[in-house]
Amino acid sequence: MVPKENLDGLSTSVQTQRATLVTMESNATVRHEQLLAKHEQSTESIIETIKSQVEKPSCPPMPPKTVCPTLDLSKGMAQRLKGKLIVGEVERIYLAATDHIYTARIDSGAETSSIDARNITRFERDGNNWVRFDVPIPGSDELVTLEKEISRRVKVTQAAAEDPERRIVVELQFAIGDHRQVAEFTLTDRYDLSFEVLIGRNVLRDVMLIDVGREFATKLPDSIVKNRNDS
């Protein structure tokens, strides 16, 4: 218990302490704000120093774009891509057996090449199976007769026919552009078709590439074309 006469002195002492606490709190706040400001100023100074000493990052230069080489097709000579002959949808083909030049359709949908053959007759020679057939001469109504040993027989299914057609296959030497080859051809009557010869995948495979937007992309050598009216 505090005597009553001492209450006034105690109240004065409490007020004095409160005032001191307020002053101390105010001074502490001021000092804290000063420290924060000094810290921010020091941090900014450090950042500016780092910026002045460190080079700005730069992106590496873009690599030059790879441009595929363009093919010079202006001369019409045989063009090649990775060693393969570039042909159009229609090409001129030289058939050695008839010594004439024909117009051939290039068709990657056909497995085996074919040629217009009429009057097909099978016969035997020296114990082997042979075939005699007539091939039309371009630009005329004449036919040239050929005799070839039969390589094999194949079944060919036409879109308009219900049953597959059995065809005789023979080997013929031909040239497209400066490319010469011996390949199998099926014998079939192509009288109602636009082209005497059809070149299929057995010739195209690993040898030729088709440029579907072109025709007559190749040119036969002058030694073949010379003195031939059917070229």
Image (cartoon, rainbow, N blue to C red):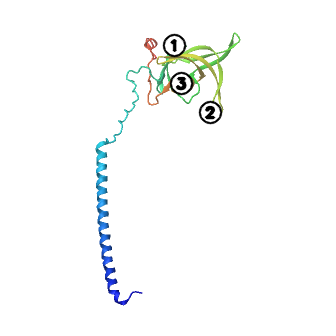
- For this view, does 86 lie left or right of residue 35? right
Q: Quadrant of residue 159?
A: top right
- For this view, does 65 lie left or right of residue 126? left
Q: Residue furthest top?
A: 126
Q: Amino acid at mark 1?
A: Asp
Question: From the viewer's perspective, is the residue at label 2 or at label 3 nearer?
Answer: 3
Q: Is residue 38 above or below residue 223?
A: below
Q: Amino acid at mark 3?
A: Leu
User: x, y percentage for residue 172?
Assistant: 57, 16
- Identify the residue shown where x is 66% and y is 22%: 153
Q: Residues within 10 Å of mark 1 (few under 14, many from 20)?
A: few
User: x, y percentage for residue 8?
Assistant: 32, 86
Callouts 3 and 1 close, C-beta under 8 Å = no
- Identify the residue shown where x is 28% and y is 44%: 52
Distance from the alpha carbon under mark 2 to that under mark 1: 33 Å
Q: Quadrant of the N terminus?
A: bottom left
Question: From the viewer's perspective, is the residue at label 3 or at label 1 nearer?
Answer: 3
- For this view, does 92 lie left or right of residue 10? right
Q: Residue furthest bottom?
A: 4
SS at circle 1: loop
Q: Is residue 40 above or below residue 152?
A: below
| Earlier sequence position, callout 3 versus callout 1 | 1
| Earlier sequence position, callout 2 versus callout 3 | 2
Q: Residues within 10 Å of mark 2 (few under 14, many from 20)?
A: few
Pointer 2: what residue? 161
Foreground of the two, 16 or 186: 16
| Earlier sequence position, callout 2 versus callout 1 | 1
Q: Quadrant of the C terminus?
A: top left
Foreground of the two, 91 or 21: 21
- Identify the residue shown where x is 29% and y is 68%: 27
Pointer 1: what residue? 99
Pointer 3: what residue? 204
